[in-house]
């Protein structure tokens, strides 16, 4: 408590940094696209448990791979210890002890995908001793770090799938495949088997002492997800909850309830439209107490104590998304600490203490938001200093503000949305940018695509169309329970947002386009063939062009609510491949040639259909790019942005957008 009180006293003094209103020139000159194409220069800065070292991931040049640099926190000017690999790419790292960093690497091992969700990369684990400056790798591929074991220095728990669960004939989704859990000794390089999961009881969680306390399995005969619990010292698992695969309510465990031993904190609807946070009694199998629920949004998650070495698994608040990520705190000191940080850090939006020493006196703080691409700070010895930015070439004053809005769809739904507003005076040209998924939760703080487009003069609308999660079960189910609404009401939600902005005088109705990726790319292709056309052009990235082909990749592997969600959605929605003859605006179609989630055959089939009837289009193949943003390197992003901006300016309808 003494250290936390001292921290609050310092915070109350403030920081000599101006956080006044932003005054920006109207419509500044756009940044060179090379600036936007850079991968994150600095990422994931963390202090060691003893507070003596600062580790961070860094990309030293635009075409280089990430490395880890380790500094002494007492002297950041001293030359750092660098960790990297010649043939593999560092993808993440964690402090596992005062001296050990455990990190993940990936390597491209093939030139073509081996089928749906079978990409070209394989991953591995390694450990670096920063005092001895020695590294050790492990043979297991595809591992997951399960628990850093704060109470057991030099040991961690990892898991991986044994055997060949993805082999021919497998009909079980990856979420239910069993994993084996091992305790690794980071000094000796040895491992000890803790427990092997099985289909009926797998996906095991461990507490900070390494005790398995929670497991989830699937009852194939009854079609139900099953949760199990056991107390420390017990060997037998007790079933505590079942949920039918036909039930779309949420049930998920956050952690143990610190106020009631033997109870769990769970996210659940429990008969309500919105997900709340509950205390669940594992003995009686009942929802015992509603801790927190909102009428306007689902509970998103919990916030743990910022010092997870000293207070592991301690929940201090509950979070939700609305206009931004927000937290209601149970712990007054944690809440006050964050409130002060949000007053002190420039352009504070999403603030997170992402690492902290055991004694609480040294920490790293991360902020990101519309005016901050992501900045890391080091707090030590009563002073705070910037460690670095993810995108140091982008000035806050030239970035765009993001506004949260709501509008009404044509059938009376309330549709939330995020609006990135460029500098200058309206009416603006508009890009509608629907998220992928489609069944995901999106909250926009700093979005590189939206900011890049706004920097080039475009207003960007990111609609949270029906099917988006976080706004209650009915809003989610309306996307598919009465038949798949892809191309129908889900599409209307996007168009209605654009028309709303026209009505508000913010957007020029003759200068509107849609750009999306994955499901968003699918939506862009659907937009291109609508008869009541409101767009001048579309840009479709990694788009599903044939819903039947896409769902057939995994139709017989799905179990649980995802099965009905996906089948009802794609089986009944519009197929862009069947509507190529209706395309009535210019199109730019982009696809990675090793996309494992939406395989390249989607684009190839669509191009063939367009060519057959002589429909013009522009195409961009990104060589070596998978579906996901972390496989888009500098060369990919530069080509993507150059092609997009050129297309919008010169080929998007008469005179360009």
Image: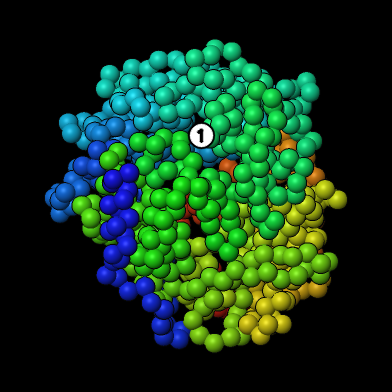
Q: Nearer the viewer, residue 385 or 484?
A: 385
Q: Is residue 380 visible?
A: yes
| Farthest top residue in view | 235
**Dot 1 lies on which element?**
loop
Q: Residue at x 76, y 70 (%)?
A: 408
Residue 167 visible in the picture: no
Q: Is residue 321 above or below residue 180?
A: below
71 lies above or below 576 = above
Residue situated in front as seen by the camera: 256 or 506: 256
| Residue name at image x 51 percent, y 78 percent | 422
Q: Position of residue 99 (x, y in %)?
A: 24, 33
Q: Which residue is mark 1?
A: 258
Quadrant location of residue 25? bottom left
Q: Is residue 57 above or below residue 16?
A: above
Q: In the figure, is residue 170 to the left or right of 47?
A: right
The C terminus - image quarter: bottom right
| Relative to 624, residue 100 above or below | above
Residue at the (83%, 66%) spot, across then down: 411
- Residue 394, position in %: x, y? 37, 69
Closer to the camera in the image, 553 or 393? 393
Residue 214 falls in image quadrant: top right
In percent of width and height, residue 569 lies at 77, 48
The quadrant of the rendering that contains the N terminus is top left
x and y percentages locating residue 69 in the rendered image: 25, 46
Seen at 46% across and 59% down, the residue is: 350
- Within 10 Å of disc 1 (Cα), the crowding (few <14, some 14-19, many 20+) is some
Task: Pick whichever, 619 or 464, lies toward us.
Answer: 464
């Amino acid at each position: 408590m003494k250290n936390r009180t001292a921290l609050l006293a310092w915070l109350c003094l403030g920081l000599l940094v101006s956080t006044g209103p932003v005054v920006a020139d109207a419509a500044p000159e756009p940044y060179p696209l090379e600036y936007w194409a850079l991968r994150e220069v600095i990422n994931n800065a963390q202090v060691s448990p003893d507070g003596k070292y600062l580790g961070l991931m860094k990309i030293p040049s635009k075409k280089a791979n990430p490395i880890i640099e380790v500094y002494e926190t007492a002297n950041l000017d001293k030359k750092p210890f660098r960790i990297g690999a010649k043939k593999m790419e560092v993808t993440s790292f964690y402090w596992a002890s005062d001296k050990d960093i455990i990190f993940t690497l990936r390597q491209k091992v093939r030139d073509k995908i081996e089928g749906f969700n079978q990409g070209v990369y394989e991953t591995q684990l390694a450990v670096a001793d920063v005092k001895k400056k020695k590294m050790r790798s492990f043979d297991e591929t595809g591992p997951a770090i399960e628990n850093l074991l704060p109470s057991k220095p030099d040991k961690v728990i990892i898991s991986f799938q044994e055997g060949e669960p993805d082999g021919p004939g497998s009909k079980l989704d990856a979420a239910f495949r069993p994993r084996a859990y091992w305790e690794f000794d980071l000094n000796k390089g040895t491992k000890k088997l803790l427990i092997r999961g099985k289909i009926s009881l797998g996906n095991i969680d461990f507490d900070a002492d390494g005790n398995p306390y929670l497991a989830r399995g699937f009852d194939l005969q009854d079609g139900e997800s099953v949760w199990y619990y056991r107390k420390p010292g017990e060997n037998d698992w007790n079933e505590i909850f079942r949920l039918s695969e036909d039930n779309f309510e949420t049930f998920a465990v956050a952690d143990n309830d610190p106020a009631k031993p033997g109870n769990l904190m769970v996210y659940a609807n429990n008969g309500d439209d919105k997900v709340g946070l509950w205390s669940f009694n594992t003995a009686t199998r009942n929802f015992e107490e509603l801790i927190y629920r909102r009428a306007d949004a689902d509970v998103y998650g919990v916030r743990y104590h910022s010092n997870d070495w000293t207070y592991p698994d301690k929940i201090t608040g509950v979070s939700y998304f609305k206009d931004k990520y927000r937290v209601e705190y149970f712990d007054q000191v944690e809440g006050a600490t964050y409130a002060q940080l949000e007053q002190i850090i420039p352009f504070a939006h999403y603030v997170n203490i992402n690492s902290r020493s055991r004694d609480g006196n040294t920490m790293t703080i991360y902020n990101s938001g519309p005016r901050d691409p992501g900045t890391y700070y080091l707090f030590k010895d009563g002073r705070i200093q910037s460690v670095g930015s993810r995108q140091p070439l982008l000035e806050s004053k030239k970035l765009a503000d993001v506004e949260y809005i709501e509008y009404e769809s044509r059938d009376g739904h309330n549709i939330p949305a995020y609006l990135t507003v460029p500098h200058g005076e309206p009416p603006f040209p508009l890009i509608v940018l629907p998220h992928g998924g489609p069944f995901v939760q999106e909250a926009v703080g700093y979005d590189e695509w939206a900011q890049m487009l706004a920097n080039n003069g475009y207003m960007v609308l990111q609609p949270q169309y029906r099917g988006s999660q976080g706004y209650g079960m009915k809003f989610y189910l309306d996307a598919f329970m009465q038949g798949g609404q892809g191309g129908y009401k889900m599409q209307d939600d996007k168009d209605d947002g654009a028309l709303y902005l026209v009505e508000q005088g913010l957007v020029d109705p003759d200068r509107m386009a849609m750009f999306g990726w994955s499901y968003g790319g699918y939506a862009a292709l659907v937009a291109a063939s609508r008869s009541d056309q409101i767009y001048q052009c579309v840009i479709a990235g990694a788009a599903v062009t044939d819903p039947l082909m896409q769902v057939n990749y995994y139709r017989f592997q799905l179990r649980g609510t995802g099965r009905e969600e996906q089948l009802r959605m794609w089986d009944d929605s519009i197929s862009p491949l069947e509507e190529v003859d209706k395309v009535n605006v210019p199109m730019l179609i982009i696809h990675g040639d090793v996309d494992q989630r939406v395989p390249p055959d989607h684009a190839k089939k669509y191009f063939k259909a367009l060519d057959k009837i002589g429909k013009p289009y522009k195409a961009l193949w990104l060589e070596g790019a998978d579906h996901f943003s972390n496989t888009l390197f500098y060369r990919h992003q530069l080509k993507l942005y150059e092609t997009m901006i050129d297309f919008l300016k010169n080929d998007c309808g008469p005179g360009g957008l």
